[in-house]
Image (cartoon, grey):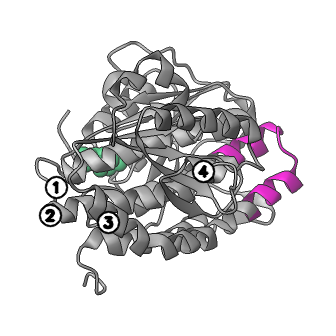
Amino acid sequence: EKGGHEYFMLKEIEEQPEALANTLRGHFVNGRIVLDEQRMSDQDLRDVDKVFVIACGSSYHAGLVAKYAIEHWCRLPVEVELASEFRYRDPVLDRDTLVVAISQSGETADTLEAVRHAREQKARVLAICNTNGAQIPRESDAVLYTHAGPEIGVASTKAFLAQIVANYLVGLALAQARGTKYPDEVAREFAELEAMPEAVSRVLTTVERVRALGRELADSKAVLFLGRHVGFPVALEGALKLKELAYMHAEGFAAGELKHGPIALIEEGLPVVVVMPSPKDNPVVHTKLVSNISEIQARGARTIVIASENDDIVRPFADHLIEIPAVPTLLQPLVSTVPLQVLAAEIARSRGYDVDKPRNLAKSVTVE
Ligand code: BG6
């Protein structure tokens, strides 16, 4: 049942191209993005003047990616909040606020209570959920089901990638409603998304190499993860995976913050994973990251660089280079996350831990 794999998580990592294709299916009809179970009017969608994204754990990291896409495509302010913090700090909500609630299970108590609070304040709620008919979608004004299929591994993989794709669809639906993108631009973006399952399949060809690297890193005391722009949430997710699965101290940082504190942690041999954007698509951020890597390399860190194919600029700074397909920066989390999932799983396995059932964690947490 693990499809010949030692653990479910690896099977689910390999199912990601299919999960993404399933999430996209049926959401672009007659040239328009369509949501599931839309119980709010198109006018309500047009009137949205502010977006909150609320979620927990990996779903929260998917939400951080949504901010970059929605602000860029829709010219709407987006705040991303941990669901457990949201309702205890009196957020400013009204009927023109859209709250996007992301939950794989659709049953997480923190997220559900945040949804209820938002609706009491008359905000509209759009749920991104992997479980048909769960409580959060039932209490929402619109839904986008991710169709990643059931996820057995407690640590999210294919559901996480599917949530990111769903966020892009929400961004395009809002851009379409608000007219910040012409129909042909929406169609072009959707076509870019449709190319992503294939791009993820290509990343999967690196799995065995990344597993070998994981075995080399299994005795590390700590690992740091750095990224900028959408690479920052990817760094946070890479660190979370390592904590959850390998019980190893791991932290993700925005690379620009390095000099404001974390650089003090760098010591000889410390593994530091750096998520690079494509130099062609985002040369400005790329240049900044190269200078960050050179700073940590000069202090003796062991650099593990996730970079686009043919990125010759970063090559000299990488002690280990993991190549991913060159894709538009906004969509890059779909490919750059994959090696980090494999790395965490393999480090955990090498340390003798149960990758599918990490200690103290539950797949769905129904208490606040
Ligand atoms: C945690 C899980 O308890 O809940 C995480 O261990 C998950 O993997 C988080 O990301 C949120 O769950 P959900 O179902 O609301 O996406």
Residue 175 is inside the magenta segment = yes
Magenta segment: 171-191
Residue type indicated by callout 4: Pro
Q: Nearer the viewer, residue 2 or 51?
A: 2
Number of residues whose C-alpha sits closer than 10 Å to that of mark 1, classed few (under 14), some (14–19) or many (20 or more): some
Number of residues whose C-alpha sits closer than 10 Å to that of mark 3, classed few (under 14), some (14–19) or many (20 or more): some
Q: Are marks 3 and 2 in contact (CB under 8 Å)?
A: no
Disc 1 target residue: 358
Q: Are marks 1 and 2 in contact (CB under 8 Å)?
A: yes
Q: Disc 3 versus disc 2: distance between alpha carbons?
A: 16 Å
Q: Specify which label sits upstream in the sequence, 1 or 4.
A: 4
Q: Quadrant of residue 356?
A: bottom left
Q: Nearer the viewer, residue 112 or 358?
A: 358
Q: Is residue 78 above or below residue 60?
A: above
The disc at residue 354 is 2
**Relative to 106, is 333 on the left or the right?**
right
Q: Specify which label sits upstream in the sequence, 2 or 4.
A: 4
The number of callouts visible is: 4
Please name the predominant secondary structure of the magenta segment in the image: helix
The disc at residue 151 is 3
Q: Disc 3 versus disc 1: distance between alpha carbons?
A: 14 Å
Q: Are marks 3 and 4 in contact (CB under 8 Å)?
A: no
Disc 4 target residue: 316
Q: Position of residue 123 (x, y in %)?
A: 52, 27
